Each structure stands twice: as structure tokens, then as C-alpha cells.
Image (spheres, rainbow, N blue to C red):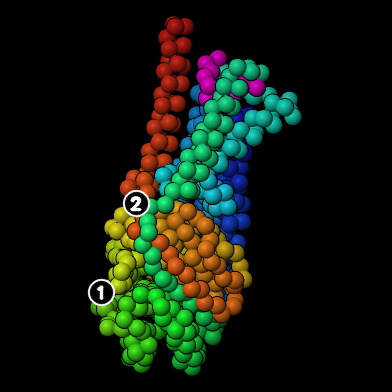
Amino acid sequence: MIHYLTTTTDKTKTVFLKTLCFGSIIMGVYHRWFLSLNEWAPMHWIIILFIGFSIFQGLFYAIGLTLFKKCHHHTNSYLAFACIWTLCEWVRVLGTFGNSAGALGYSQINLLPLLQLSSIISVWGLSFICILGNILCYKLIVVYFTNTTIPILKNRSWITFNPYNTTHFYKSTLIYIFIICIAYFLGSILLNSNTSTKVEHISILQGNHAQRFKFDPLNWKKIIYDYMYLTGDSIYDNIPKPSHIIFWPETVIPSLLNKNSWHITTLKEQLRSQTSVIFGSSIKENDLYFNAALCISSDTLDITNSYKKTKLMPFGEYWPLKGFFSSFNTIAKWSTGNDYSKGTKIQLIQTTNSKVSTGICLEAIYPHIFQKGTKQGADFLAVLANNAWFFDSIAAEELFQMSILRAVENNRFLVLASNNGISAVVSNKGQVIQKTILNKEQVIHSSISTGHKKSIFTLLPYITQLICIIIICFIYKIKLLNIMTSILKKN
């Protein structure tokens, strides 16, 4: 794509269509788990939704890259390309249908030194560095392995690329290498730093119940009994611990669990002093339904000590344009019924010793949710999920990978509790402490450190976006001034 945009003579419309195809294909690859939803709706509607969403997400890249090409005759700046790509990734996460899946920064979860930079520049900053690395590889390939002609401009600087001008080539290449090396060195320092000695003991219960099984009310008692049994075992295994938090996944059963008196009473009787259970359940307030995370202790279930999901999944938890879709007979039965309502604020859950910033399922893909929770004083992060909807697709693995970034971005340990996997404990440095596998009943016992210092990203969440905007303005302002100066001299 870099080569195409910097060498093509195609018209703007052609460039837009080609970059739209490129972006849509990339987004389709990352969202292919959509196709696993054919169990819950007709396959032709799933395909339409999959294609439509992929094109919608690809549209952001098409607009950004077309603008880059449109301005490319003013400058040959590959640094501008990296900034525009980064801003495209950020903008497409905004709004009702926003989604961060497919951001290049997520590819760095196994490169721990570089991953640490997300605590400063977020996943978007990692994407910027990835683009610089790709540009560097491209430049080397063009110079040493091909005879590709690159447009030669009269007004060049260190941010332009002319392979036949070795001075400019080596200068810009060395600058890109320097940026990447500095990033890696700084990340290595951050990786070996630690600022907390506080410890919280946690357990994660992965009950592994199929979604069809959960839909049948006749199975609800067994599901609750399974979790009660796993909870009792977890308490017994952690008797020496002064405090203990047990995590159940999202919506253990599709019912108002907080209204189930037998469940609440039995669970309270099991819990020791200073032991809490955080679990997912639907709740009802003022005739509105919410997807929520609740906390129960041996003393009480306080409905105010809860978190209501603020970022709902379109077509899953509510229907956008519900009146319009209800007019189609073939999909009316899926769009009827009560929708979930959206929570209005990021609220921390208070346990005996810790404050927890909780996200529910796909909220793990949104950096701002956990950034706000950490800024409010969260000691660690938690994600309650139910990946049983997606069977053996890549959805669970993608959610797990994106959760790792949320931990590092905010310098907080993260607990991921999923009904059928993947459940995990991730350190504030992105190290996977423990991890389960899909479709197996498992329990995790672990100790996590809490109360780390707030990261730069937590305090300044838009630093990468601002830097990219400033760089773009600087590049095009300088080039525009050079062009205007040249025109004035000719006149």
C-alpha cells in the first residue's frame, strides 16, 4: 500500500476504491468471527452484516489514505503516512460502531520491551512505530532489490524518499532506526520497573457452559450449583489468605441473578469475612435492563456497588434503528423484545481492600473505558466475558490479546473471566501470569499486585493523536510554504 500510494498515477476515485477494498479486506480478516454467529441468525443476514461492517471499518482507511495521496504531490513524506494511518485507527474506534480490532499495535503483544511504550503512547502509538518499521523495510527493498521509480521532488528534506539521493535516503533511514531503537530501549527500562508491593488474592471461575445450554431455564439451577461448587473450592484453597476476590464471568445465566434469593443467600453463607465475589448479571432498574457487574460479600449485595455496561454491542445487546429493522419480517423476531440500556458512567467496584475498574466483554477493546477507571483510582482491571456466543472462532483470542494492551496502557494488572475461555491473569507489564484454554471447566488462583502508579497514558490519553496532528500540520505547512515561495520567485 505504501508503494502504491507513492507511485500510482490513478485518479482520486480509483485510489479511493482500491484503498477501500484494501481496508475492507483487512477488517474482514480480523472480524471473521462474525461468521460464527450463524447459530443465532440466518446465514445470509450474518454475511450481509459481516460485509457491511467490514466495508464501514475499511472506509476510514480509504478516506485517510486517499487524502494522503491527494496531498502527496506536495510532499513525499512517509512520516505523514504513518501519522495519517495512526489517526485512521483511532477515529474508527469512535461512535456506535467503533472497533479497535485490527490496529497494528496489537501485533506487538509478544514483544514486551516495545509493548511497554503503550503506557505512554497507547496502542495507537505502537501502530505508529509499526508503520515506521514497515516504511523502513520498504525503503530498503526499493533501494536494494528493485528498480522502482519514485517521484523526485525539487524541495526535499530528511522526511522525503528519493532512492537515487543517498544523502537523504541514509539520513531518513537512520532517523527511523533511531526512533525504533530509542523506543525499544525505553520500553526495556519500563519493563524492569515496578512500583507496588500491595497484593490482592484472586480466583477466576470458568464454568464452561454452552450458550444453548444457558438458554434453557431448566438448566439454570445446575449452572448456579456449578459456580457455587467452584466458589466453595476456591474459598477452601485460599483459607490462609487475608482477603480474596472471586470472579464469575458475564451473565452467568440469562436472568436477574441479583433477584434470585436462593443464590444470594447461599453465596453469602459460603463467603468468609473479607471475601468478595464479582459476577456478571442482567439487572432491572426503573423498567430498564442493564448488563452489569455486581459485587457480593458475606455482609451484603449492594446494588449501588456495581458497574453498568456503557458500550453495548449493536445488534447483540440492542438494535440501532430498531423501528426500521422491525419492518423486515425475516428479522423482526430478532429485533423485538427488550434491549439493554447503556450505563451512563464509569463506576468502580469497591471490595474489601481494592477498587476495581470493570469492563464487560467487548468493552476490553476500548482503551478509554479502562483509562477513565484507572484515573478514578482503580487498583486493578477486570473484564467479564461470555465468548460462548462465538464457539471456537478467533473472538476469544482477539479479546484476550486486546485485554493485554489495556493492562499495559494503564500500568495495572488485569483479570479476564470468561464463561468458556479464554480466562487469564495479565500483569501490568503485559506478561501472562496464567491462562486457560477454550471449552474446558477451569479455575485460576493467583496473586496480583495493586496500586501501581498511574501511567502517562492514563493521565494524558490523547498524546499520540496530538503529536500526529502536529506532525501533519508541520509537514504540510512547511511544504506549502516552499511551494508558495517557489511560485513567488518565478513571478
Q: Which residues are magenta?
A: 154-163
Q: Residues within 10 Å of mark 2 (few under 14, many from 20)?
A: some
- The quadrant in which the N terminus is found is top right
Depth check: 382 or 450 in front? 450
Q: CA distance from mark 1 to mark 2?
A: 26 Å
User: Are discs 1 and 2 less than 8 Å apart at CB?
Assistant: no
Q: What amino acid type is highlighted by mark number 1? A: Thr
| Magenta-colored segment: predominant secondary structure | loop
Depth check: 444 or 251 in front? 444
Residue 390 to residue 413: above or below: below
Residue that sits furthest to the front in the current view: 240
Q: Which residue is mark 1?
A: 304
Residue 424 on image: x %, y %: 51, 67
Which of label 1 and label 2 is nearer to you? 2
Tell me which corner region of the image, top left, top right, bottom left or bottom right, holds residue 131.
top right
Q: Residue at x 41, y 24 (%)?
A: 477
Depth check: 275 or 435 in front? 275
Q: What amino acid type is highlighted by mark number 2? A: Lys
Residue 205 on image: x %, y %: 48, 77
- The quadrant in which the C terminus is found is top left
Do we see residue 60 in this rendering? no
Tell me which corner region of the image, top left, top right, bottom left or bottom right, holds residue 38.
bottom right
Q: Residue at x 38, y 38 (%)?
A: 466
- In this rendering, would 219 be left or right of 353? right
Q: Earlier in the sequence, mark 1 or mark 2?
A: 1
- In this rendering, would 213 be left or right of 307? right
Q: Which residue is mark 2?
A: 454
Residue 237 to residue 35: above or below: below
